[in-house]
Structures are given as C-alpha cells and as structure tokens.
Amino acid sequence: MTDERIKIGYDKIRSEFMLIVYFAALASFVIKTAVYGANFDRSLFEFLVLVIFPVYQAVRAHQLGIAVQLDKNKVKSSFITLFIVFAILIIYGVYKIKSTNMNTEEILEVVSYLVAYIAAVTVIRILFIKHENKRFENLGKKYDD
C-alpha cells in the first residue's frame, strides 16, 4: 500500500515532466520552423505533442470528473502572448526570407504551416476553455447543496 503523499508527489513529478516535454517540443518547433525553415515532415512529432497534449489533458480531466474554471484574465493574457509570439515569428520570418532570398513557394510553405499550426492550437484552446467553463458550472450545480 502506498502512502497518499507519495502518490501525490509522483503525480506532481510526472505532471512537471510533461510540461517540460511540452515546452521542449514548443521550443523545438519554433527553432525548426523559424530558424531552419522546416516543413511539416520535419517537425511532425513536435506538432503532434503540441496539439495532442491539451486534448489529452481535457479528456483525462473529463474522465476523472475534474473541472477547472479558467479565469478570463488568464485566458486573455494567454491569447495576447500567443499573438505576440506569432508577431515575433512573422517579423523574424520576414528578416530570414530577405536574408536568404527564399523563393515564393518556400515562403508560402513555411507561412501556411505556421498559420495552420497557430489556427489549430487556437481553435483547440478556445474549445477547451468553453468546454471546461461549462463543465465547471454543471458540476457546481450537480454537487451544490
């Protein structure tokens, strides 16, 4: 039989490690795409980790009956951060394109890949936020005394 504190500690360590993997995949994706101009084939693993992680988190939270109400200020700040990162990537991409003299086809491939990724992450994030807030309200009504 395992002590509850030890189990909670292991769970916390696993959770922190998953966040490390997530941010490592994010850094790898940004570096491969922005610096090396990688296409979808070269960063498929990073793309899958970045898209599947929030989906898996939402599914597991639903299975365990956990609902987290997401603060509107935090949601707003996360979208502002995403927009800033996107703007920085565009500025860097323009600089990189001018310095390497990429042709139009290569430029469109990199830009469409980045736009598709950011659109997918944004849509998943919006759906996750709406779903979690609705679940939080429903579970509150269900267990309210």
Image (cartoon, rainbow, N blue to C red):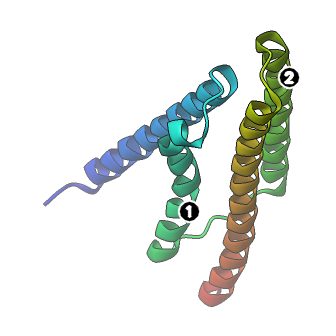
At x 66%, y 78%, the residue is 135
Residue at the spot of label 1: 55
Q: Circle 1 sits in a helix, a strand or a loop, which is it? A: helix
- In this rendering, the answer to whether 63 lies above or below 76 is below
- In this rendering, the answer to whether 29 lies above or below 140 is above
Rounded to the nearest angstrom, the CA distance separating label 1 from label 2 is 32 Å
User: Label 1 is placed on what type of residue?
Assistant: Val
**Number of other residues with Cα within 10 Å of mark 2, as a class: few under 14, some 14 to 19, many 20 or more:** few
- Viewer-proximal residue among 103 and 15: 103
- Residue 145 placement: quadrant: bottom right
Give the position of the N terminus as an image quadrant. Answer: bottom left
- Viewer-proximal residue among 2 and 83: 83
At x 78%, y 38%, the residue is 111
- Residue 102 placement: quadrant: top right
Provide residue 67's location: percent of width, then percent of height. Answer: 60, 70
Provide residue 20's location: percent of width, then percent of height. Answer: 47, 35
Considering every residue shown, the one lying at the far top of the view is 99
Of label 1 and label 2, which has the lower sequence position? 1
In the visual, does 52 lie left or right of 68? left
Q: Are marks 1 and 2 in contact (CB under 8 Å)?
A: no
User: Label 2 is placed on what type of residue?
Assistant: Val
Provide residue 36's location: percent of width, then percent of height. Answer: 62, 21
Q: Circle 2 sits in a helix, a strand or a loop, which is it? A: helix
Name the front one of labels 1 and 2: 2
At x 68%, y 61%, the residue is 124
Q: Number of callouts in the render?
A: 2
Residue at the spot of label 2: 94
- Residue 122 placement: quadrant: bottom right
